[in-house]
Amino acid sequence: MFTKLRNRFLIVNLATISVMMLVAFVSIYMITYQDVRRSIDMELHKITENNEYPQGNFDRPRIEPTSPETDGGPMDNGKFPPERSIFFMVKTDQERGITDKISKFDIDNELYELALQEAVSMNKDTGQFNLGGSDWTFSVQPTDEGFMYVFLDVTDQQGILTNLIYTFAVVGSVMLIALFFTSRFFANRSITPVKEAFDKQKQFIADASHELKTPLAIINTNTDVLLSNSEDTIDNQSKWLYYIKSETERMTRLTNDLLYLTQMDDSKTNMIFTKFNISDTVEDIILTMEAVIFEKHLSLEYDIEPNLTVYGSSEQIRQVVMILLDNAVKYANSKGSVTLSLKKQQNEVILSVSNTGEGIAAEHLTRIFDRFYRTDASRARKQGGYGLGLAIAKSIIDQHKGKIYAKSVISESTTFYVHLS
């Protein structure tokens, strides 16, 4: 699926760039073509104007000497354009028969005849044709006795246009090859996050289904037990009802957590941020957790800098602190300790929650915030965890533009850090 998506992206990208290149090349060619045609037309017009002779005086003009100062152009009042222009003129009668010829170059008589035939066959006032390997353009003007044809060699100008097409073809081919590999590289990079998100989504669905499967199986089994002893009293079967209720509550917590994560992922979720006293919030949570910590035979140490304030949602930050403190209590070793610190460093408020215990291996530290991820699934299941708490905490901190991470020393301690501003 992702290979097809990458190929589709690649094709669309190449097609779009190819069309843009084609439009650019055609535009450049058309502009160049118009400039060349304009130059040719001006030169034809100049030749025609400079070499109009009164009727009956269509003799070969005298070629004036040239001067370096005028770049090879005629001196004084010479009538021909610069020597770089190869041209000749033919005067005909009404039946297009040649009556006179004029050229400053040595031209074979056959060329006059062939050029005139080409021009007459086109039946236009102006046109272009190829003759003897050279490109010629012509214009026709009527005279009292017939017509005057002016022929101009435009091989160089046509060569410019031809070379331009070849250049575009070569440059375009090279660019398309380079763009193919470049586009493929970026297509692979663009598809990678999509593939990762898709894989995570599949894993998320599989994990959620697995977590729901266990309590559903327990509920189903206990329901079968109740149905098989339908004549027994409710009091005698209360433990089966208790199991059903307990698993139902687990499913409720799981679905609520999943719904909460979905809401957090929704960019349209409206959250009310205000400035609140995080020191008081953390102290309140510690008071609610003291009984649980005492029952676990753990020692609690905390150092809270008073009157620290942050900008955000107090309820969501409260939930983050609860998750971190609850995890610290759950996974602390027997008769271990839990330490909480809330300090301000520069422009940030830093919360740290530590516990003594088995610790977390380095390869797990970057993944513990993934949904349903647990370093020890069997131990987490005994503790009643689903692997969603830290994912929820990270989502909340991300919404607050903060940072959350963990550090751990195996068989010693684990510390979670939260940075807020």
Image (cartoon, rainbow, N blue to C red):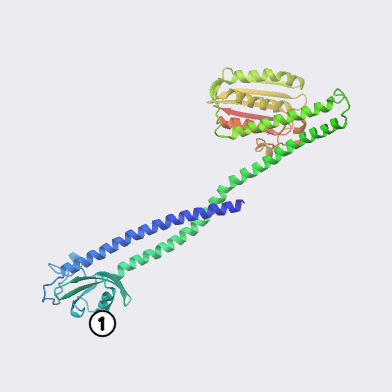
On the image, which quarter does residue 95 sit in? bottom left
Task: Say whether residue 394 is left or right of residue 338.
Answer: left
Task: State the image coordinates of residue 386 (x, y, percent, origin top left).
Answer: 71, 33
Task: State the image coordinates of residue 188 (x, y, percent, origin top left).
Answer: 57, 51
Q: What residue type is labelled 1?
A: Glu
Q: Residue furthest front?
A: 231
Classify 355 as above or below 209: above
Location of the C terminus (image quadrant): top right
Q: Nearer the viewer, residue 304 or 259?
A: 259
**Residue, x 48% and y 58% (percent of image)?**
176
**Residue, x 29% and y 61% (percent of image)?**
35
On the image, which quarter does residue 184 sit in? bottom right
Q: Which of 272 and 142 is in front in this view?
A: 142
Tag 1: Cα neighbours inside 10 Å, few (<14), some, or many (≥20)?
few
**Residue, x 66% and y 33% (percent of image)?**
258
Q: Which of 418 and 45 is in front in this view?
A: 45
Secondary-structure class at tag 1: helix
Total marks placed: 1
Disc 1 designates what residue? 110
On the image, which quarter does residue 208 sit in? top right
Task: State the image coordinates of residue 161 (x, y, percent, origin top left).
Answer: 34, 65
Classify 335 as above or below 56: above
Task: State the image coordinates of residue 163 (x, y, percent, origin top left).
Answer: 37, 66
